[in-house]
Amino acid sequence: MSAQPDHTARRALAQSISVVERGGAPADALIASALEHLRQAPPGAQPLVIGITGAPGVGKSSLVSALSDQARTQELRVAVLAVDPSSAATGGALLGDRVRIDERPDDAGRFVRSLATRGSGRALARAAAAASLLLEAAGFSLVFVETVGAGQADLGIARLADLVVLVEGPEGGDEVQAMKAGLLEAADLVVVNKGDRPGADAAAERLRSGLALGATPVPVLVTSALDARGVPELLQQIIAMGASRTADGRIRRIAAHLVARAEGRLAERIATADGDGTLATLARSVSEGEMPLTGAAETLLGDGRSA
Amino acid sequence: MTAASPRVGWNVAERSTPIRVLIAKVGLDGHDRGAKVLARGLRDEGFEVIYSGLRRTIDDVVSAAIEEDVDVVGCSILSGAHATLLPKLVAGLRAAGAGNVVVVAGGIIPEADRPSLHEAGIKAIFGPGTTIGEVAAFLRANVSAA
Ligand SMILES: Nc1nc2c(ncn2[C@@H]2O[C@H](COP(=O)(O)OP(=O)(O)OP(=O)(O)O)[C@@H](O)[C@H]2O)c(=O)[nH]1
Ligand SMILES: [Mg+2]
């Protein structure tokens, strides 16, 4: 039997991600100390945060697993945040991405965490930005963020990630779809996965011709997560595009966290107003002409005291 | 209560977030129907369920449990290797500093083997015919406040 891997650092990181998922003052304190740690650290390269998005089942998790293996051959420390939806009715979630991501229990340079959306109503968890800051402070140099399988535009990932990779299957990618789907607008790179299946190259061609109509050319690559074909080239492309980025990723992620936090507060406020009848009262006042729409909306947004 | 603030699956008095459960399938058999039914059932009961997939090793399960910071590991075993694997899982979690994780087992485990498994730290053994509701109730009662 192999020696017991040392799980101390891994466990501390995992627990701190749980704290930011729970939110509140403990989360703020943790994020603040991670940022303080980053300020004290000698200025080095920031991690590259890569959003992986695309329709359900196109192979996002499998591809992340293959990319992680590839990155480890280059000694890059890799973390994965894999997001799946929470049920709005029960709050429960089935987090299934891990099934497709190979376990490497002895490798301290790899960390995989599943996040439930927990009422964000989005393709991302509210804690994703904060978690990526914690991963940066823990010294990971590549962070993959897999969104909920989304077929439609959810641009939250573009706010958080340095680079957004849109994954398509070999059947997808007709030109019209390419032009109308909001997801494509957010993509810096498009991957046609399941390249081991017939039709992948043709799908890539269709996407290329559709994307050629856009302002900036978006590279389209073909991969197979099954046999790793195209995966080294994809990682190389990701790293090259990451190297030429100009924006400050940390600022971007702090901004994404601020937005998520504000959205969380707003959702709480609405839930409270819903629960205690304030919302119904406001609506009634508007209906009876006692209150203008703008006033009611501002009251709902504001601290409610003016009501 | 509105749908926006679900309560099911929470230890209401103390917790504000769902209980996290890793459902792990160890051993060589390729049957995971039962594990999947349990995973879906617990999701519907309000738990956050991480499903590990087939044929994981004990080291895989320990590492996944740590990274996912779960409250519970539910280990499904059909291959008859429970007598050695389950105590190893508990020992692995303890060695990793996660001795507080509640370990439960499902599958076909003979009555005669149960006392030694309980002694080794397995909190519950759910045989065939156990309902999801029973599993959920046991977990809510046995997971301590976060
Ligand atoms: N043939 C083939 N199958 C693949 C490939 N990549 C993934 N798959 C299979 O496609 C299915 C879905 O793969 P996932 O990696 O779970 O896809 P996903 O996009 O993460 O799915 P969601 O997270 O549920 O949206 C699985 O059965 C994989 O084995 C590939 O390159 N080739
Ligand atoms: Mg996935």
Image: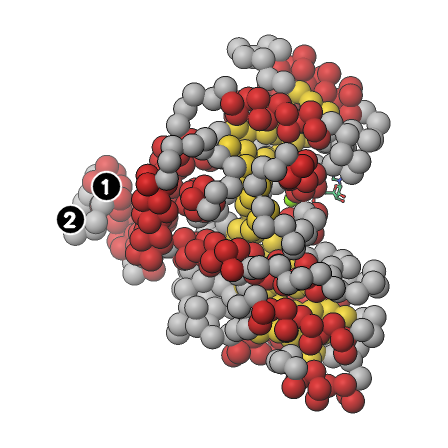
State whether discs 2 and 1 lie on one chain: yes
Its colouring scheme is secondary structure
For the C terminus of chain B, the quadrant is bottom left
Quarter of the displayed picture in which ligand 1 can be seen:
top right
Q: From the image, tell me which residue sits under label 1.
A: A298
Which residue is found at the position 53% from the left and 78% from the top? B142
The residue labelled by disc 2 is A306
Determine the CA span between mark 2 and mark 1.
9 Å
Callout 1: few (<14), some (14-19), or many (20+) C-alpha neighbours within 10 Å?
A: few
Circles 2, 1 touching at the beta carbon (< 8 Å): yes
Subunit that carries the residue with mark 1:
A
Q: Secondary structure at mark 2?
A: loop
Left or right of A279 in this view: A154: right
The secondary element bearing badge 1 is classed as helix
Query: Chain ID for label 2?
Result: A
From the image, which quarter does the N terminus of chain B lie in?
bottom left
The picture places residue A194, in percent across and down from the top left corner, at: 76, 33
Is A263 left, or right, of A52 in this rendering? Answer: left
Considering depth in this image, is B123 or B1 the residue closer to the camera?
B123
**Residue at image x 79%, y 65%?**
B27
Q: Hey, what amino acid is under mark 2? A: Ser
Q: Is residue B56 above or below residue A187?
A: below
* Residue A2: quarter of image: bottom right
Residue A181 spot, x, y in % from top left: 58, 25
Residue A126 in the image: state x and y as whole percent: 43, 46
> Given the image, on which type of amino acid does mark 1 rest?
Glu
